[in-house]
Image (spheres, helix red, strand yellow):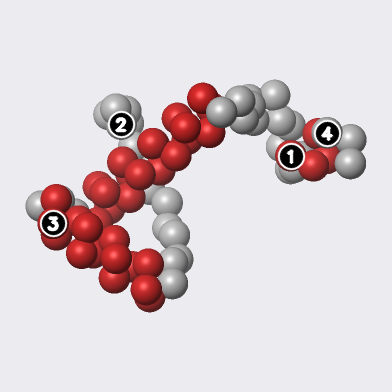
Amino acid sequence: MIDSMSKRIQVTVPDRLAEELEKWADYDGRPVSNLCAYLLERAVSEAKREGEDWSTQQDGETKEHSKGQ
């Protein structure tokens, strides 16, 4: 579920992906931005289920840096 307080972000994607997203959004009868928000939320939830944990990261720290690489 998307929170009622939303933050706008701008994303640049390849033309081919934009066309696929537009087709998918049209098929679902929703705006592309709404479809993208849904897909991003799903991807974050899946990453968390798979054990990704960026909650302990400090600003500017990367995944590799936090592992000591």
> Which residue does the numbered mark 3 point to in the structure image?
27
Q: Position of residue 63 (x, y in %)?
A: 74, 39
Q: What's under tag 4, amino acid-wise?
A: Lys
2 vs 40: above or below: above
Can you tell which of label 1 and label 2 is closer to the viewer?
A: 1
**Residue 7 pos. (x, y %):** 38, 41
Estimate the x, y position of residue 6 in percent, counting from the top left: 34, 37
Which residue, as the protein is rendered here, is positioned at the far right? 68
* Circle 1 SS class: helix
Task: Verify CB contact (< 8 Å) between mark 3 and mark 2.
Answer: no
> Which residue position is annotated with label 2?
2
Secondary structure type for disc 2: loop
Q: In which quarter of the image is the N terminus?
A: top left
Count of marks placed on residues: 4
Nearest to the eye among marks 2 and 4: give it. Answer: 4
User: Which residue type does callout 3 highlight?
Assistant: Tyr
Residue extending furthest left?
A: 29
Q: What residue type is labelled 1?
A: Lys
Question: Image height check: is 55 above or below 31?
Answer: above
**In the picture, residue 53 is in which quadrant?**
top right
Give the x, y percent position of residue 65.
Answer: 83, 40
Looking at the rendered structure, the secondary structure element under dot 4 is loop
Separation of marks 3 and 2 at Cα, in angstroms: 21 Å
Lower sequence index among marks 3 and 1: 3
Q: How far apart are marks 3 and 4 (CA)?
A: 42 Å
